[in-house]
Image (cartoon, rainbow, N blue to C red):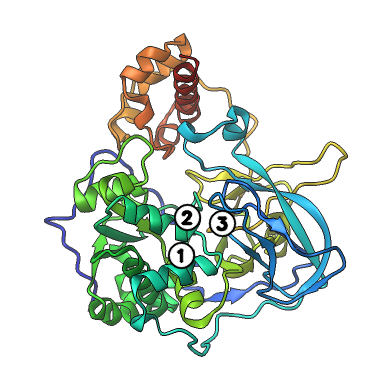
Amino acid sequence: MSLGLLRPRYGTFSGGIDLPDEKDTTLETPITTIENISHLRVPLAPVHTTPAKPIVSIGQRVHQGEKIAQSSGDGQVDIFAPLAGRVSKFCQVILPVNTPASLCQDRDEYIIGWRVSPAIELVNLDRIEPFSSSSSVYNWLAADEFSLRERIAEGGLTTFNKRPVSLANYITTARNAHVDTLIANVMENTPYITSDHRILAEHGLEVIGGLSIIARAMGVSNVILTVDHRRTDSYRQAIAPSRLHGIRTIALSNKYPIGTNSILIRVLTRRRTRPEGEGLEVGVAVVDAATCLATYRWVVFGEVPTARVVTISGPAVKNPANLLIPFGADAEEVLTSAGVESDCLTIHGSVMMGNEIIKCATPAGESIPAVVSSSTNALLALEQSAHSSDTTATPCIRCGWCSDSCPVRLNVAALNDDFELGRINSAKRRGCMYCIDCGICSYVCPARLPLARRIKLLKLAIIDKSIRR
């Protein structure tokens, strides 16, 4: 038995490319817990808004799941201790910035791809426990929509995608936007990453339960689970409960970037989002497997979200795995424990749209590490190319590969001309703001031009010009 692959209706989209899979080392690797974490630096601003306020003091011993910071409102969430430990100090961490260019206030921050968040350091940690079969403490099937929304708000839940927001706020916004469709996006169509695949394969019943809870809280009846058509045999345990809850299961081609929300929405519903839109404005909400799992385990078992499944992979990783890692774990420490050497290129997220992990320090010289947060689906390590120092781009040869592969059908070569000649108005007329930052143009360019970065700079220039007016 396999999920319904409805090729005549749910097909493909213009442009896009077939990326190498590179998932063999972790595709069938069960989720395990990480070991030997020396400390955690728990971010107080997992959502990019006002940080939560600490309610613990230095030297205090905290229990796993204990609240350690109170939400400031403004869309932020309460923060809970991922593991039992002792509060060592208040510090800083860096988290990836995936805010749309139109909402970014700091040009340098957006280009670099990271933001600084205050954090609480915990030491003398207990071991992390694997997902277990806990006893139910809340009957969600008997709860009404209002009670479910209150329950979700109490758990400090965020979405687990690349732009995390308060899940309670996301649900409220979806209701206010009269959303009629909810999609669980488990396409995961970039190389190496298998975290959501393993979550659905091993915890399919809970994922479907969490998706149903979110749908009921939103008041949505049209619910869709989308997966890669090559993986359907791994998701057998999700089929029966999805039918029980009236969830349609659709398997799609894995052509990149179908996993991008705007492209997936277009393929499934034929609705087009505005530039850099998230779907709510066209009546569609999108979540992922990790969000659904965390929702179920909080609502039903009372387990606050303190960790997530992260794929550790890449050619430079000696011990690839799918690990359950607590929030606040140092990304470099995690990669080192997996056998990654210090001279490798390390990436937070996907190879196409992720962020290169950088060295950052305070003015006093104290290191500010990149840490695992709700947006961390993968930590990848790539070998430095033997020709990595030879990065000089050559002139555009007008091959047209960039434009042919662009999933939103932009004339990328002409936009590159606009960048080189400083033609901001021309770039805007060509639809520059519709770019979804998928990175395909840079990937296919034989001249090795940094096209994706140039278009990103054009978008920021357009926004700056409109603000000045």
- Residue at far left of view: 8
The amino acid type found where label 2 is placed reads Asn
CA separation in Å, label 3 and label 1: 12 Å
Q: Quadrant of residue 188?
A: bottom left
Comes first in the chain, label 3 or label 1: 1
Q: Position of residue 61 (x, y in %)?
A: 82, 74
- 143 over 259 or under it: above or below: below
Pointer 2: what residue? 161
Q: Quadrant of residue 113?
A: top right
Q: Secondary structure at mark 2?
A: loop
Pointer 3: what residue? 376
- On residue 291, the disc is 1
x 61%, y 62%: residue: 78
Q: Looking at the image, which is closer to me, 65 or 248?
A: 65
- 406 over 324 or under it: above or below: above
Q: Position of residue 189 (x, y in %)?
A: 39, 54
Q: Depth-wise, is mark 3 or mark 1 nearer the camera?
A: 1
368 displayed left or right of 387: right
Whether the residues at callouts 2 and 1 have beta carbons within 8 Å, the answer is: yes
Q: Position of residue 353 (x, y in %)?
A: 48, 43
CA separation in Å, label 2 and label 3: 8 Å
361 displayed left or right of 419: right
Q: Give the crowd class for mark 1: few <14, some 14-19, many >=20 residues within 10 Å.
A: many
Quarter of the image with the C terminus is top left
